[in-house]
């Protein structure tokens, strides 16, 4: 398994991965049409390119045999002390193979000045909640607008100190 930085030529494959993982994970929670709308906005080619161009961030891919099977995107806060994990997705057919753990470790290592990592997760996504809890994340709060302002998507906020 190769963990590497994303490039602009990867964005089509990343978008396909996000469409597949979002429908597999969230159709039952939000409905297919709502997921289609979210994916169209949050994971548009322009949105992905903007993340790729962000300087205080890490946009990482898990690749095996030339196939992208996972991705992660995180960005540091202005002071560099906190890393916000915005995305960590693995192809559903590859769950349970350690890919998510490798991506998470790579994100943590990409920000050596950070003292903690934070994320928002839909509490109905029990697989993701269990994944993060197993890796030392604790629930520290809630939000009514996961992912972006006025999303109307409630989520739990989880955090983990980075032992540096």
Image (cartoon, grey):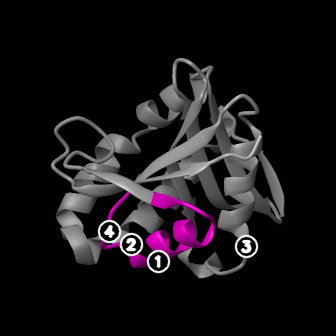
- Mark 2 to mark 3 CA distance (whole Å): 18 Å
What residue does disc 1 label? 127
Q: Secondary structure at mark 1?
A: helix
Residue at 70% x, 56% y is 103
> Residue 162: where, in percent of width, then height?
68, 46
Which one is nearer the viewer's eye here, 113 or 107?
113
What residue does disc 4 label? 123
- Mark 1 to mark 4 CA distance (whole Å): 9 Å
Mark 2 vs mark 1: in front: 1
- Mark positioned earlier in the residue sequence (1 or 3): 3
Which one is nearer the viewer's eye here, 73 or 85?
85
Mark 2 vs mark 4: in front: 4
The residue stretch that appears in magenta: 121-138
Residue at 57% x, 52% y is 160
Which one is nearer the viewer's eye here, 4 or 36?
4
Within 10 Å of disc 2 (Cα), the crowding (few <14, some 14-19, many 20+) is some
What residue does disc 2 label? 25
- Mark positioned earlier in the residue sequence (3 or 4): 3
Within 10 Å of disc 1 (Cα), the crowding (few <14, some 14-19, many 20+) is few
- Mark 1 to mark 3 CA distance (whole Å): 14 Å
- Mark positioned earlier in the residue sequence (2 or 3): 2
Tell me, for residue 98, which label it has, or none.
3
């Amino acid at each position: 398994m190769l963990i590497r930085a994303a490039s602009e030529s990867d964005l089509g494959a990343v978008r396909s991965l996000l469409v597949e993982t979002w429908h597999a994970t969230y159709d039952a929670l939000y409905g297919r049409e709502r997921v289609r709308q979210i994916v169209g906005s949050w994971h548009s080619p322009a949105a992905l390119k903007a993340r790729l161009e962000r300087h205080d961030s890490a946009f990482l891919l898990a690749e095996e045999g030339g196939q992208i099977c996972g991705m992660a995107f995180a960005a540091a806060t202005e002071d560099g002390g906190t890393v916000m994990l915005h995305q960590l997705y693995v192809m559903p057919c590859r769950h349970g193979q350690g890919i998510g753990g490798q991506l998470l470790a790579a994100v943590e290592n990409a920000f050596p000045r950070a003292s903690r990592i934070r994320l928002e997760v839909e509490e109905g996504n029990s697989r993701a909640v269990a994944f993060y809890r197993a890796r030392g994340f604790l629930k520290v709060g809630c939000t009514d607008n996961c992912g972006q302002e006025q999303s109307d998507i409630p989520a739990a906020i989880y955090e983990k100190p980075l032992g540096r």
